[in-house]
Each structure stands twice: as structure tokens, then as C-alpha cells.
Image (cartoon, rainbow, N blue to C red):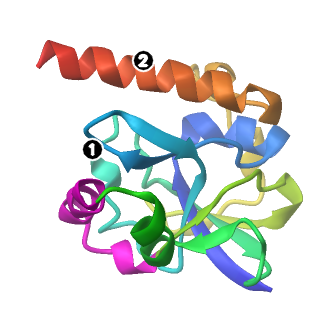
Amino acid sequence: MTIFYHFTSADALFGIGLHGLTVGDVPTDIRKGRGVIGIWLTTSEASQGHGLDRSGRHKRRYRLAVDLPPDAENLHSWQAWSARHATAETVVGLHGTADAWPTWWIFLGVIKPSQIVGCFDTEVGVPVSDWQEILTEQSKAAVVPPWRRTAWQKKMLKQVTKALQKR
């Protein structure tokens, strides 16, 4: 097995504890607002350099350790996958927002809670054993069970389109 990392906010921990890592947007064509549902992972323990500061939530706060077989069918190196599935403009755009992109991986499926083998609070600098029990006001709204992945993506893309139109 190989350890990958996924950074997230406190708002998402409760839902991840219930259902695992179920959603994430992997852009394939930034200009057309297209993408696939996938979980962003990295081999880097550092939260900097991934472009997470652009989110409205504090996604650099918690680092989840995910244990996956390196030959998992749905696990792809971002570099190899994006060369075949994303437009050049999309790749250049994402790489321009973050310098840690060589460490990126995507998982095109659901990562079960049992595959999450640790949580680390990057702000305080300590492991968090009861991370699944951390609740915030937004936690319940952030719960996305696997069967709601497609609805989540449609809603998210609609919000992105509205935000872009306001510019």
C-alpha cells in the first residue's frame, strides 16, 4: 500500500467520516466548465503549493492520510491523466495556480472511510484521532453520500458558472 494525502477543511470532516471521500472536481475543460468527479490526492505532506488558498473554506487545515494500492484501477497520476483527458489550457491554468502539481494524483471513485488511516491538524501540528466527530455549522451541508456525487457536481458547476458570469 501507498500513503497519499488529501487536504480538507473542518466542515468536510464529519461527512468524510460517514461516507469517505466522495466528491471533488477535476477540470477537463476550464473554458467550457467541464470536468469529472474525482478526489484530489498528493504525495506531498505540505499543504502549500496546491492552490487551496483560493477556496472559500480553509482546505489546508486538515491533512488526511489515505492508504491505497499504487496500482488501484481508479488511481491516476495527474500528469499522465491530464495529458490524455484535459485541454492544454486547463492544464496550464491549473499548473499556474500551484507549484506542487507534480505531486498530484486523482482517484476517480469513492475512497472509503476505512482507507483513511490518519488525520493531522496542520495549523496546530498534531494528529487528530477523533476527526470524524468534528462538527461545524456547515458540516451537515457538506455531507455528500456516494449516490449524490452527480447532483453535487451539477450544483457546484452551476455555482461556478454564475460566479463567472458576474465577473
Q: Residue visible at 33% across and 74% down?
A: 100
Q: Residue visible at 84% across and 54% down?
A: 112
Give the image location of residue 7, x and y in percent: 52, 58
Mark 1–mark 2 contact, CB under 8 Å? no
Figure quadrant of the C terminus? top left
Residue 94 part of the magenta segment: yes
Mark 1 burial class by Cα count in 10 Å: few <14, some 14-19, many 20+: few
Q: Earlier in the sequence, mark 1 or mark 2?
A: 1
Callout 1, which amino acid? Arg
Figure quadrant of the N terminus? bottom right
For this view, does 33 lie left or right of residue 157? Answer: left
Residue 56: quadrant of the picture:
top left
For this view, does 113 lie left or right of residue 90? Answer: right
Give the image location of residue 150, x and y in percent: 66, 28
Give the labeled residue for mark 1.
54
Callout 2, which amino acid? Lys
For this view, does 45 lie left or right of residue 151? Answer: left
Task: Check the image and report above or below for 157 versus 54.
Answer: above
Give the labeled residue for mark 2.
158
